[in-house]
Amino acid sequence: GRAFQEFLNRLESEQVEYDLGSENILRDRARVSGANLVVGQRSYGVVVQPPGAVVGQRPPGVVVLPPGTENLDAATVKLLAAFLKGGGKVLSFVDPPRYGTGAECDWGRELAAQYQLSWLKAESKVLGSPDFEIARASTAMGKLFHQRRTLDGGQLVFLVNSSLEERAAGSLKAVGRSVTRLDPFTGNIEPYPARISGSMVESDFELPPAGSLLLLVSNTGQPAPKPAVQAAGRAVAAASEISVKRVTPNTLALDYCDLKLGAEIERGLYYYVAQEKIFKHHGLGTNPWNTAVQYKTSILDQDKFAPDSGFEATFHFEVAGLADKSTLRAVVERPQLWKVAINGRTIEPRKGEWWLDRAFAVFDIAAHVVEGPNALTLTARPMSIHAELEPVYILGEFGLVSQPAGWRITAAPALKTGAWKEQGLPMYPDAVSYSRTYQLKRGPGRFKVRLGAWHGTLAEVRVNGKPAGVIGWQPYELDITGLVADGSNRIDVVVYGSLKNLLGPHHGKISKGLVSPQSFRSAPAQPPAGAAYDLEGYGLMDEFQVVATAGR
């Protein structure tokens, strides 16, 4: 399996066009017509020309036997024999297979010997197309792949650099007369620089890490000239200091609790462990929603618990030095399942208000929060099959400081460039705005916003309050010329984080980029220090630049 996948990756990287063939489909749907292998309505090989027509240069059909091929079904063997007899080619990356329909036989060696000029032990470069070619630049080490579609009057080519570190570059040559760039993100359509090379048109390209390019090669039109090289530009001095602020309230996730089952209290339990204990205490082997598949209403049918059943889960948080507590809110998932109390005072959700999801209710807690330790308690009585305990959340205008067990809520600090998690926002999932004012003069030149080091899912740029576009991939810059005014201009760069720092996973062995239910099952037995939580360092690390270039 690994060898086959590596072989496909090799074909992709060398720009070889192919389809995968199923022996069952070949048996039921394939036939041979001369040097053509026809599957359903798709013909692999020379297109049949009408009498008197000039035969094109398209090669005969090709069947590839990939690495690892040891056996072929009898129906495939019969098909290959007719295909080779008609002039088709077999390119084999293995010795002739020794087995037919699972039995040792000589058919492979016999066919290879009979059709020595058509049964080739080949390298993938033999599979190229005469009307299309991509030459890679030897100095660009990116992972270059492509998709190509032949259309009436041209070809559509999508180039992708799958490397996140290295650029990819080279030239594309295809039958045609002109090239057009299609921008899937903006919808812009514009001529792309190209040159004529005999019956083909040739274009150079360069893709940054994770970059892509969508080109339409047309059989008509004239190639666009290569544009003049633009000067690197100069950084414009800012007219103000940078201003940094959160877009939405700060957040704190509480994922450890004290659990009361009957008269017994266990302290400092990870919420997932508490889930398991709750369901086991009430006669279920485990959390039914986490490990089972419901057939009809088989899980719901277990919702039969005594009136005095249930549990209490208390989540603790500490407040120190927060003079204004008026913005504090709590968020609890599925509020209809619980009686919710803050420091012993029962509270009700705000009507019609939710956060992140309609099932996440918002509670006012400001009037009941005190300096020092605080407790948010969820009580389920009687027990419900739906009472799956999850973390709770605190929202508001505050900062967070790591302590030996979790986090302490403090006054919100002034923000600056750098990682949010180092500035009291370790679990903040939303956006932070970075703003400066520039004195600019419109003219024949252009203006770009250019980012230095930053980490986030996306950066949005606004000019004088108007959206200018987004920055999410290299090169980390955006043309803002059309929105620039003569005189003072306010430039905002808004960096977006993600829900990872808020929702986790925060503990255990974490594979970056891969999250599953399993990712949330492991955590320290007791609440760890806040600094031990696994968190991304989102933020704008360097101040952004506005760059002016001469010319249009």
Image (cartoon, rainbow, N blue to C red):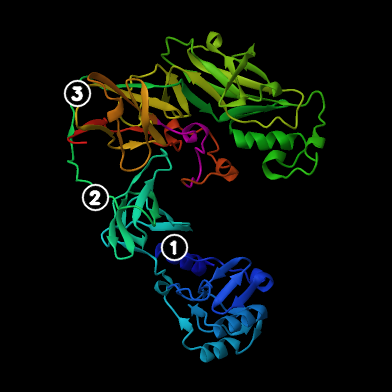
Mark 3 or mark 2: which is in front? 2
- SS for callout 1: helix
Q: Which residue is mark 3?
A: 441
**How would you classify the magenta stretch by its main secondary structure?**
loop
Find out whether residue 471 is within the magenta segment.
no
Dot 2 corresponds to which residue? Answer: 226
Please provide percent x and percent y for residue 94.
Answer: 50, 80
Residue 302 in the figure: left or right of residue 401: right
Q: CA distance from mark 1 to mark 3?
A: 48 Å
Q: Nearer the viewer, residue 358 or 361?
A: 358
Residue at the image point whose x is 68% and y is 36% from the top? 277
Disc 3, SS = loop
Q: Which residues are magenta?
A: 496-511
Q: Residues within 10 Å of mark 2 (few under 14, many from 20)?
A: few
- Label tally: 3
* Residue 161 seen in the figure: no
Q: Which of disc 1 and disc 2 is earlier in sequence? A: 1
Residue denoted by label 1: 12
Q: Amino acid at mark 3?
A: Lys
Q: Amino acid at mark 2?
A: Lys
Under mark 1, the amino acid is Glu
